[in-house]
Amino acid sequence: MTEIQPTSSSGAARKVGDVFGGFAAMLVALPSAIAFGISIYLILGPEYAARGAMAGIIGAVVIGIITPALGGAPRLISAPCAPAAAVMGALTGELFKALKIPPEQAGGLLTVVAGLSALLQILYGAVKGGRLIKYIPYPVVSGYLSGVGLLIFISQVPKFLGVGTGHSFWMGLANPMFWRWEAITIGTATIVGVVLAPRLTKTFPATIIGLISGLVAYLMIGLVNPAVFALKGNPLVIGPLFEHSSGLLGNLRQHWLNLAGVDFAMLSHLLVPALTLSVLLSIDTLKTCVVLDALTHSRHDSNRELMAQGIGNLASAAFGGMPGAGTMGATLVNLNSGGKTRLSGILEGVGTAVTLLLFGQLVGWIPIAALAGILIVVAVRMVDRTSFHLLRQRSTLLDFAVIAVVVIVAVAFNLIAASATGIILAIFLFIREQIQGAVIRRKAHGDQISSKQYRITSEKEILKQHGREITLCELQGSLFFGTTDKLFTELEPDFKTSKFLILDMLRVQAVDFTAVHMLNQIEDMLAEHGGFLLFSNLPPHLPTGKDLRTYFGQMGLVNSEQKTLVFESQDEALEWAEDRILNDEKQAHHFGEIPLELGETELMKGAGGMEIADAMAACFELRIFKTGETIFKQGDVGDELFLIRKGVVRIRLDLAEDRHYLIGVFGRGNFFGEITFLDRGHRTADAVAGADTELYVLSRSRFDVFARQNPAQAAELFARLARGLAIRLRYTDSELRALKEA
């Protein structure tokens, strides 16, 4: 088949869409990046506002170009983001204010944190950790993001009010004498512009309209107070981007000098912030990727994207930029503006670089209060207000409590403490869910279910009388310290009264040492009254990779000297327990003992049975099979009825890869093959001799000849056959009821 190549017009249209998408995304990402950078560095003093703006712009350029080129999510826009601003802002405050680190050295340490975080992101992608990060519980993620939003809001309110950097949030809020009406006016105009923009136009991004509104307000203030038109020393604006007119290369040289003077003895203080930052940036990126997949019906490569984000952030740190992630707002604008490929993301970074080179000096005139207004809107939207719906139901109160605790810790202490709290709460939520889940999938006793060994009527009656001596438990999920007590409590009434406790492990996902210790206790309690602990379906490989049979042996649970046995299947364990009960009652029929006469088989027993057996003796043929020999195969055409004189026969279905499913086991005195005897159809399963076996075989053709000469006795045989099938169906019905009710 000839592959259809896209036309040049469609390719050109796609490129045009990428150009418009990249340009629109740049208009959204650039103001936010400047605002995020300033929010970090302004803590060091007003003179560092310009450096913060440069860090945001450089981050938008470097991350914007490198990450889309290498990433696994085309159309994703990567740029400095709110989580990065929150974590690095909190760290800046701790280094500068609490640890008294000089501003220049603090800037170098921020670069080290960004670099370490980037290396961790590369590691996450390399070890295929992209999926694992997405498994962090939503309440923890919601608490993180809401905490980030509140921290950004708290950090931006003083800038919105025009309060100097030397005053805290509460001090500035409580003292209106520190407020500046110019800053409040600019910030309010910006917020109004951002909020109302979507209602006015879909063409221009809301942040651009908000920024223009703030600039217009600034110009209007200049008509009243001409002093605001001075750039240098003006606290209302960013100020000159390049220190002492050193230019971009001079700033880069100064950045590397600051980095060279870093005291790496501080490295221990930076590991937790770097870990927190790497996780938050990864979550923010992957969350945006998931939304992008849903909108474009595509599928991203999470591990490749994490590695690309790490490489982009590492390069950004090297050039003095701040770290970032895949951002929701700029990505959606890119998509809605026609962005189709990774080229749109690259063009966003290129557009930012062009803006810096052409209009770098104009950036210094952007009002700080306008950027604060943009970030306040971002912060408010980051707070997960839908989480309050969790208060409506008792079952979700704990989830809301988790969100609230993470938020409180983030605001009261810092995001680093919140990350540790979040990890602890995530573990707690996992344990809670495991504990609440049922460890016992099904529980039944020997008077409700039986093995697939078909027993004669007298044996069935004995097993029904002693059925409570057998307890079968199908376990599921994880057996660990959080669920062992619950399992012990649920089983305690049974292993005190049962002689045979069968634990089916087919659906077990994990087992720890605490669970093994509990199973040892159960074994000891069963042994006190001569009981046995039986395991069936031990998985050779749990999802964790653990071989359960080997592990039980290493822990001393499965030992030939103890009363603990392992069986391949649940049915084999049931059959062994039933044989023990019948042996104790002296009723078990041991294969290899005296063969039955025809009149002693289950089908012929009872009044008149011996006469029928004598009359039909010539119709039956004796066949002998060695252990493992096939009696008939699935699909064979047959019309024969088999009565077992001696031995055992297993009826099974062959499956793929040399596997089979056991349907039933027939012992001495039982009959099988009745379906094809009645309808002369195809065999529906295989019959295999489970031991040296002797069979009485009656073909339908011989029976028909006998029936024409002896109609009354033939009818009696059919009646006995129907009665035998009815008894089997009754037992099947009772087992199905037990399965349904368990």
Image: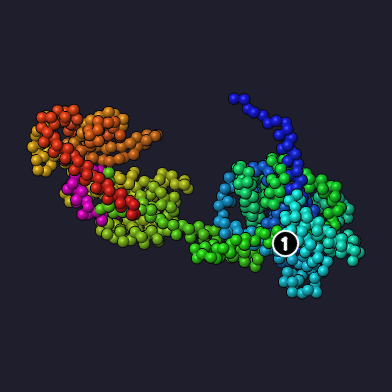
| Residue 673 vertical position relative to residue 518 in the rendered view, above or below | above
Question: Which residue is the site of mark 1?
Answer: 376
Residue at image point 78% right, 74% down = 176
| Residue 698 vertical position relative to residue 176 in the rendered view, above or below | above
* Residue nearest the viewer, comparing 73 with 232: 73
Q: Residues within 10 Å of mark 1 (few under 14, many from 20)?
A: many
Q: Is residue 615 left or right of residue 143?
A: left
* Residue nearest the viewer, comparing 99 with 430: 430
**Chain part drawn in magenta:** 453-473
Give the quarter of the image for residue 699.
Answer: top left
Asked whether the viewer can see residue 74, the reply is yes
Magenta run includes residue 45: no
Q: Is residue 198 left or right of residue 558?
A: right
| Residue 167 vertical position relative to residue 15 in the rendered view, above or below | below
Q: Position of residue 100 (x, y in %)?
A: 74, 65
Q: Position of residue 214 (x, y in %)?
A: 81, 60
Residue at image point 68% right, 61% down = 380
**Quadrant occupied by the N terminus:** top right
Residue at image point 29% right, 29% down = 636
Looking at this view, name the residue that lies furthest to the right.
226
